[in-house]
């Protein structure tokens, strides 16, 4: 594979060679008629890849693992995980492969990974495949998260395989080429804890420290510092989700990264009307992963990580538990601080604004939005106009604006910065009705609405004339939205 500068891009098989216990060498299934549906040219350049090369038949085959690049040893990764609270000791990549690691233009090591590349030894009853709609969905939502500055895995390409896949009906198959700072999950550590001696666990932790949290290596207690760093990264990440109204939908421990990147866009969605109970996943009947539960679930998942790491924290189990409990105690404080800092920015208040005043204002505002079933994203954009003196657009979102007026008077007394609010509150998010419209067209062969939406979402904070239909909530007839896990 020729890289952008005409040199050869080298894949490393670092995970594959260092973690034979966690990596099953495997080949991607041959696609009968591969067609490149979407290519992320900017990301390709960042990785040192030439987009023109990737658009050739050979490049497209490389993107789905049908042509193995130099140095690559594709592997299915083993991991365990708690799914909806129940423990599965063996999950692993049932339909995915790690192609290998590459070093990007900034010197960062990145995983290149395939999703939908065929059955692996971890496939259980699954067919190992993925279809066009959900893979384009992951592409859209992950790239939108990135554009909003939220840590996430990235999407390099979606390639149609030319192979029909049986779902509720027959659907066109596809492979997503995903890029991540790594695919290490809480579930990777759960698997290592159960299936290896402490040596494997320690090597995995050392690998994660060197890739993601190198400062921990220099701490007095490196593994405690590592755990603290994962807690900090997740507290910050989940705060970012909450601030933009994102519902991940399937926060199982196998879907929570060690890096602090959002991973596995399955039944995820952005809220329209503000509602702490918002659930979109058809299989989440108890609402375990509802919008408002996400911080609590993150903490629960990190407790599972603590259990896996115990032998590394201290040789005496009681002392190890005490250390883990102390570290976990910081999650709530860190989450609240990250959330409040973000909420202050959304409200146009400077970092020096009084925390208690800002927290009270924010909580009262969210109660008003909930009672009024107000569209979350539109409201904060309208509020930035209100900061400039034009309160009408925000007012009109409430059936009964009196309570909002009283709130706004107190908020305006703090002199919010309208311009700063424009930079903190996205106008374009992947709204469910727009995503569905784009995916339905793409599944039928028309990629124009998808490309247009992807372009709009790439610049979420700059309001542009002519894009009004991308900025508002779903029309009333869109109904209640459900996403499906059988992706
Ligand atoms: P998820 O919670 O969607 O990330 O996936 C949970 C587990 O199911 C992982 O081990 C996946 O690899 C596996 N899986 C999901 N869909 C399929 C499929 N169609 N074929 C095989 N394995 C799958
Ligand atoms: Mg997963």
Image (spheres, rainbow, N blue to C red):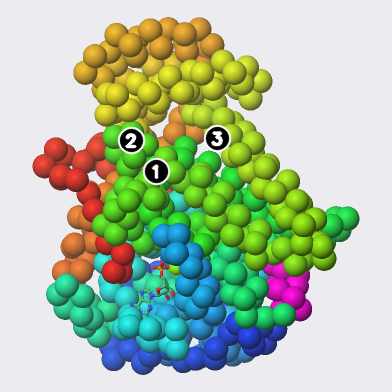
- Cα separation, mark 1 vs mark 2, equals 8 Å
Residues under numbered marks 1 and 2 in contact, where contact means CB atoms less than 8 Å apart: yes
Q: Would residue 272 be found to the left or right of residue 311 on screen?
A: left
Residue 204 on the magenta span: yes
Q: In the picture, residue 329 is in which quadrant? A: top right
Residue at 38%, 87% (x, y): give it.
119
- Cα separation, mark 3 vs mark 2, equals 17 Å
**Pointer 3: what residue?**
339
Closer to the chain start, of discs 1 and 2, is: 2
The image position of residue 238, as x and y in percent, is: 52, 46
**Pointer 2: what residue?**
275
Mark 2 residue's CB less than 8 Å from ligand 1? no
Residue 33 on the magenta span: no
Quadrant (top left/top right/bottom left/bottom right) for the C terminus: bottom left
Of labels 3 and 2, the one closer to you: 2
**Pointer 1: what residue?**
291
Majority secondary structure in the magenta region: helix
Vertical comparison of 254 with 200: above or below:
above
Q: Which residues are magenta?
A: 198-209
């Amino acid at each position: 594979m020729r890289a952008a500068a005409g040199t050869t891009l080298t894949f490393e098989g670092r995970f594959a060679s260092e973690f034979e216990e966690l990596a099953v060498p495997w080949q991607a299934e041959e696609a009968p008629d591969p067609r490149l549906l979407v290519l992320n040219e900017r990301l390709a350049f960042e990785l040192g890849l030439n987009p023109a090369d990737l658009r050739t038949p050979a490049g497209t085959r490389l993107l789905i693992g049908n042509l193995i690049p130099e140095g690559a040893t594709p592997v299915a990764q083993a991991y365990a995980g708690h799914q909806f609270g129940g423990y599965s000791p063996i999950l692993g990549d049932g339909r995915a492969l790690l192609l290998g690691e590459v070093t990007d233009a900034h010197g960062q090591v990145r995983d290149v990974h395939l999703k939908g590349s065929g059955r692996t030894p971890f496939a259980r009853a699954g067919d190992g495949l993925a279809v066009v709609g959900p893979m384009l969905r992951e592409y859209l939502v992950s790239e939108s998260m990135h554009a909003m500055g939220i840590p996430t895995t990235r999407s390099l390409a979606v390639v149609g395989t030319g192979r029909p896949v049986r779902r509720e009906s027959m659907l066109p198959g596809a492979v997503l080429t995903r890029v991540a700072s790594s695919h290490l999950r809480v579930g990777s550590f759960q698997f290592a804890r159960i299936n290896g001696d402490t040596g494997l666990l320690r090597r995995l932790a050392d690998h994660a420290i060197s890739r993601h949290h190198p400062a921990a290596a220099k701490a007095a207690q490196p593994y405690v510092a590592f755990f603290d760093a994962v807690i900090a990264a997740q507290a910050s990440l989940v705060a970012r989700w909450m601030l933009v109204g994102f519902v991940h939908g399937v926060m199982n421990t196998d879907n929570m990264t060690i890096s602090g990147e959002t991973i596995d866009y399955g039944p995820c969605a952005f809220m329209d009307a503000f509602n702490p109970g918002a659930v979109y996943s058809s299989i989440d009947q108890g609402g375990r992963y509802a919008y408002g539960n996400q911080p609590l679930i993150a903490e629960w998942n990190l407790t599972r990580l603590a259990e896996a790491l115990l032998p590394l924290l201290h040789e005496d189990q009681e002392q190890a538990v005490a250390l883990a409990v102390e570290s976990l105690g910081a999650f709530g404080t860190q989450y609240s601080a990250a959330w409040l800092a973000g909420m202050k920015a959304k409200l146009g208040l400077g970092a020096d604004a009084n925390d208690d005043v800002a927290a009270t204002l924010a909580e009262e505002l969210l109660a008003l939005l909930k009672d009024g079933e107000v569209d979350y994203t539109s409201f904060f954009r309208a509020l930035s106009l209100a900061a400039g003196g034009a309160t009408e657009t925000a007012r009109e979102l409430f059936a009964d604006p009196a309570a909002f007026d009283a709130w706004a008077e107190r908020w305006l007394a703090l002199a919010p910065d309208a311009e700063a609010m424009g930079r903190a509150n996205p106008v374009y998010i992947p709204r469910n009705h727009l995503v569905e419209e784009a995916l339905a067209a793409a599944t039928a062969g028309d990629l124009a609405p998808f490309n247009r939406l992807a372009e709009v979402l790439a610049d979420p904070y700059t309001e542009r004339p002519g894009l009004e239909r991308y900025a508002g909530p779903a029309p009333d007839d869109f109904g209640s939205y459900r996403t499906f896990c059988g992706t």
